[in-house]
Amino acid sequence: MSEILKKYQIDTEENKKFQEEIRENLLNFGHRFPSPKGSSYYLGDDGTPWKERNRETWITSRMTHVYSIGTFLGHPGSEELADAGLKGLREELHDTENGGWYAGLTAEDQILPNKQCYAHAFVILAATSALLAGRPGAEELLEDALKLYDLRFWNEEEGLSCDTWNTEFTVLDDYRGLNANMHTVEAFLAVADAAGKEEYRVRSGRIIDHVLGWASDNQWRIPEHFTKDWTPDLECNKDQPADQFKPYGATPGHGIEWARLITQWALSTYKEDTQGAARYIEAAENLFNRAVKDAWNADGAPGIVYTTDWEGKPVVHDRMHWTLAEAINTSSVLYHVTGKAEYGQYYAEFMKYLDETVMDHVNGSWFHQLDEHNQVIGTVWPGKSDLYHAFQSTLIPFYSPALSIAAAVASFRRLGD
């Protein structure tokens, strides 16, 4: 095997070194994210802040999460950057009058309306990572975020989370969605790992059981959008198929991402009970394999298409960087958990495509959106908003698949590596 091929192969020293180089590039790229009060600027093509754009809570949370992990990796400046993000979350993005976190702020410091479950899940994730990193204020942020989330978003009777309130928390939107619930699972698992609150791991399992029921009834293509009584709305946004957060049809990248989270939950829940975990891991394989079959190289060019219809035919052919990052993550996890060679082969293919097409070797980071010919475009994701998906894909292949990534890196570092 030639040297250039080895750097794409899972569990080789060459791949570990390659991923370390990618990780350092990403961490260096993101240094200019904090605004003076801490909320995150949206980063442009070369990492320059686009100060005319909104400063959003979900991006601020993601960057806080990334640089909290950066503290364990010894990346210079990580402590200050994590603290800046925490300041933004604890102060200017926090609604002291109504509770919770604004969706964000405009360039003129005007409040973006509504309270998003999606954003609040990321606040929790950021707080758990910052807690593990020992950052000042992280524990208080986590306590506040969990209390608010439990009050406003979690529905104990349904075992699912709602999606969007108005700013004052007086009107709940009828829309229900799985994107927010997916990141809720991620956040809840992080809470269990970082703070020992196992009830949140149990909640994650309740969400997962719902998702697997819907997916298995739909040829392992996950319905994304629902009415307020959790009836799937398979035609949602058919006239706006490339919507940034609510695209029409199946989103293969989410099928891939769910597969990893389900595997993490199963391994961390059942531990020594291999039979208990096995049926969930099999379901995770079904999700991954369906998504890859539908979306990877689906139209004659490399890449994972953004969406398909309910028969698996591509609808939006654009390639989003986050889907590739999640494919790298999940293929590595399934390879390590099942030992099946095909997942290692997929990992190598994804890494090769990343290196040759999606990484920006000139300006840094990854191109966030490419068209069906793999030309850079920005109709949905202009610039390079944040580091979260790409950064995690440089770590998840090397750590325990049973642990949230911040907890995994923290535990490993504390053992003396």
Image (cartoon, grey):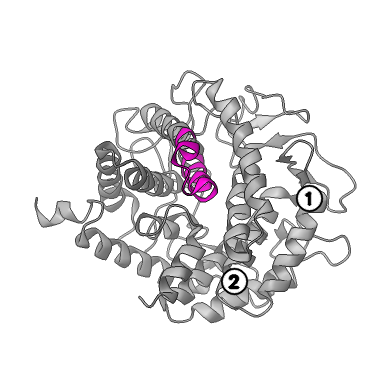
Q: Give the image location of residue 290, x and y in percent.
A: 42, 28
Q: 21 or 15, which is in the foreground? A: 15
Q: Which mark is residue 360?
A: none
Q: Is residue 216 magenta?
A: no
- What residue sits right under mark 2 in the picture? 130
Q: Residue furthest left?
A: 2
Residue 50 visible in the picture: no
What's the amino acid at mark 2?
A: Ala
The 10 Å Cα crowd at callout 1, few under 14, some 14 to 19, many 20 or more, is some
Q: Give the image location of residue 34, x and y in percent.
A: 59, 73
Tag 1, which secondary structure? loop
Q: 238 or 273, which is in the foreground? A: 273
Kindly identify the residue that appears in the image at 29 percent across and 33 percent down.
301
Q: Main secondary structure of the magenta part?
A: helix
What's the amino acid at mark 1?
A: Asn
The 10 Å Cα crowd at callout 2, few under 14, some 14 to 19, many 20 or more, is many
Q: Give the image location of residue 173, x and y in percent.
A: 80, 38
**Is 74 on the left or on the right of 52, as rendered?**
left
User: Is 64 located above or below residue 59 in the figure?
Assistant: below
Q: Which residues are magenta?
A: 258-279
Mark 1 and mark 2 lie on one chain; the one further toward the N terminus is 1
Distance, label 1 to label 2, CA atoms, is: 25 Å
- What residue sits right under mark 1 in the picture? 114
